[in-house]
């Protein structure tokens, strides 16, 4: 009996000790602070760098290329410049590569609180206000350089003038010779019309991104990619349209090569390029004023109706070429009654 009581008493005691250990393990001491391991400690400088990167899209060790004629840099610290002390400057020329060495926030500067220290290929270091630096440099990436070139106002004005003059002359020559041209006297192929619609849609999409998602486009400018699946879906849809444009353009060239003789094919492709250039300029500019959306809908209706109107209904009995009407085949010269 005593042994049985001892066993029961021991069991109860063990149960109480187990329960107390579990409950004490779940108890949290309010005065005790949990410390991260050394590997997870984040410096305040790194936090500031990440915060700056989220709003300015670049940080230390980022590479730029000078696109202006020159960029003046100050050798001394920004505080010396703000205090009116004597400073030395040197200039980096167009095409030189620069790397961001340091970034400082100077609240006392009434012009621009952000100062950036840059280093060139010769290890010369100099400071510049961000507002003075960014208009004179561009990211060191071919895609960013392409975007920068076509975003320049002088380049755009020159491009518009060249496109208008070139397209006017080319279209006049095409109509004068009564040659084939997309939308008006088209060949029996869906791809040229589809290419024009994709160019117009991409130009509208491009202007829409600049209006409604400027920060997203700014980040893409500093960190470009051609992979539509590694960016947000809005930007990915635009990149996907660019890839589709390239594929459809190759298909259109192949269709024209098989549908027309060499001389007429070259003239047709020149007219197609002129129409695409006009579409890009027209829709990228008019979308900024919200008119481009209505024009895009009207353009889709016009293009589809023109394609259906010029679609071939006959086949040459001699060579198998498609014909819009009965009569002489433009490929082999056979008469089709």
Image (spheres, helix red, strand yellow):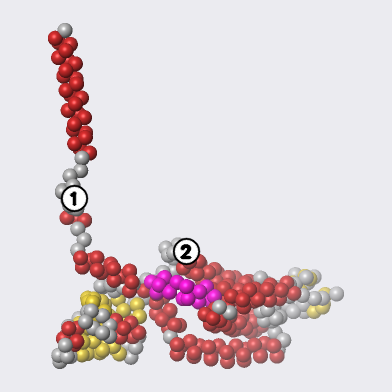
* Residue 213 visible from this viewpoint: yes
Q: Is residue 19 above or below residue 200?
A: above
**Residue placed most toward the observer, 297 or 99:** 297
Q: Quadrant of residue 227?
A: bottom left
Label for residue 34? Answer: 1
- Percent position (x, y) of residue 296? 61, 75
Residue drawn at the location 19% of the way across and 83% of the way down? 78
Residue 149 quadrant = bottom left
| Magenta span of residues | 203-220
Label 1, label 2: how far apart the Cα atoms are: 40 Å
Tell me the number on the disc at residue 233: 2
Q: Was residue 215 drawn as part of the magenta stretch in this picture? A: yes
Left or right side of 219 for 105: left
Residue nearest the viewer, comparing 174 with 100: 100
Is residue 321 at least partly visible in the picture?
no
Res 130 quadrant in image: bottom left
Q: Which mark is residue 203?
A: none
Q: Quadrant of the C terminus?
A: bottom right
Can you tell which of label 1 and label 2 is closer to the viewer?
Answer: 1
Mark 1 and mark 2 lie on one chain; the one further toward the N terminus is: 1
Viewed as shown, does residue 124 lie left or right of 177? left
Q: Position of residue 289 (x, y in %)?
A: 54, 81
């Amino acid at each position: 009996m005593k042994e049985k009581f001892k066993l029961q008493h021991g069991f109860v005691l063990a149960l109480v000790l187990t329960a107390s250990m579990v409950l004490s393990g779940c108890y949290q001491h309010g005065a005790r602070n949990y410390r991260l391991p050394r590997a997870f400690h984040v410096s305040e400088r790194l936090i500031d760098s990440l915060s700056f990167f989220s709003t300015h899209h670049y940080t230390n060790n980022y590479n730029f290329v000078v696109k202006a004629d020159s960029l003046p840099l100050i050798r001394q610290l920004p505080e010396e410049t703000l205090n009116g002390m004597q400073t030395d400057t040197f200039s980096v020329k167009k095409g030189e590569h620069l790397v961001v060495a340091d970034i400082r926030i100077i609240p006392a500067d009434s012009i621009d609180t952000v100062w950036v220290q840059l280093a060139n290929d010769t290890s010369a270091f100099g400071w510049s206000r961000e507002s003075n630096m960014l208009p004179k440099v561009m990211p060191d990436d071919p895609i960013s350089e392409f975007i920068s070139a076509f975003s320049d106002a002088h380049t755009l004005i020159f491009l518009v003038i060249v496109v208008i003059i070139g397209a006017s002359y080319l279209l006049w020559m095409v109509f004068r010779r009564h040659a084939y041209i997309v939308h008006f006297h088209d060949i029996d192929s869906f791809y040229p019309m589809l290419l024009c619609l994709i160019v117009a849609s991409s130009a509208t999409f491009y202007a829409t991104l600049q209006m409604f998602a400027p920060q997203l486009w700014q980040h893409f400018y500093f960190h470009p990619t051609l992979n539509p699946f590694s960016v947000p879906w809005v930007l990915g849809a635009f990149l996907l349209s660019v890839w589709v444009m390239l594929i459809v353009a190759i298909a259109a060239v192949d269709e024209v090569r098989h549908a027309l003789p060499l001389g007429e094919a070259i003239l047709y492709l020149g007219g197609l390029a002129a129409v695409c250039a006009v579409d890009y300029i027209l829709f990228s500019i008019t979308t900024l004023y919200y008119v481009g959306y209505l024009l895009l809908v009207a353009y889709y209706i016009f293009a589809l109706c023109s394609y259906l109107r010029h679609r071939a209904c006959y086949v040459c009995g001699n060579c198998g070429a498609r014909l819009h009407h009965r009569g002489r085949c433009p490929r082999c010269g056979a008469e089709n009654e």
